[in-house]
Image: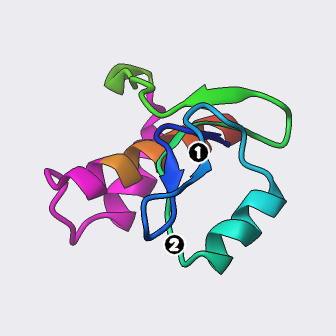
Amino acid sequence: MVLANHARDLNGGLLLAIGEKITDKHILAFKAWGITEVEIDSYEDENGIVEGQSSEINVESIPTQVREELDELFRYTDRRHPAIEELIELCILKKMKSH
């Protein structure tokens, strides 16, 4: 994973700079400093494929089966909420890779 913004401790000290790749050691340091989350710019999956946060999905390219699965999964949510929109997009990307 690559940082989208500087990771700072609770006093504002720099722990890891923007654009740096996050390692397991960094995650341990974040936990030690009480940092529970950081903003990720991109990540590398298990196959070495790098993806950015701002991937645009063409709705017409989503297979019907994937749309139906996600419709069922998110049937009780407000799909206009930004967090839900992001979660749905991540689910679509993951399911598209598996199809």
Give the left or right position of residue 53, taking residue 16 as reference.
Answer: left
Image position, residue 87 (x, y; %):
39, 54
Classify mark 1: residues with Cα within 10 Å, few (<14), some (14-19) or many (20+): some
Asked whether the viewer can see residue 54, the reply is yes
Q: Nearer the viewer, residue 26 or 74?
A: 26
- Which residue is located at x 67 percent, y 36 percent? 20
Task: Estimate the spatial distance between the alpha carbons at disc 2 and disc 1, rounded to whole Å.
Answer: 27 Å
Q: Nearer the viewer, residue 66 or 46?
A: 46
Q: Which residue is mark 1?
A: 95
Image position, residue 93 (x, y; %):
54, 38
Q: Nearer the viewer, residue 95 or 89?
A: 89
Q: Which residue type does callout 2 highlight?
A: Thr
Q: Which residue is mark 2?
A: 36
The residue range painted magenta reads: 62-85
Q: Earlier in the sequence, mark 2 or mark 1?
A: 2
Cβ–Cβ below 8 Å for labels 2 and 1?
Answer: no
- Which residue is located at x 21 percent, y 72 percent? 76
Image position, residue 9 (x, y; %):
51, 65
In magenta segment, residue 69: yes
Q: Quadrant of the N terminus?
A: top right
- Which residue is located at x 81 percent, y 60 percent? 24
In magenta segment, residue 79: yes
Q: Which mark is residue 58?
A: none
Q: Which residue type does callout 1 highlight?
A: Lys
Classify mark 2: residues with Cα within 10 Å, few (<14), some (14-19) or many (20+): few
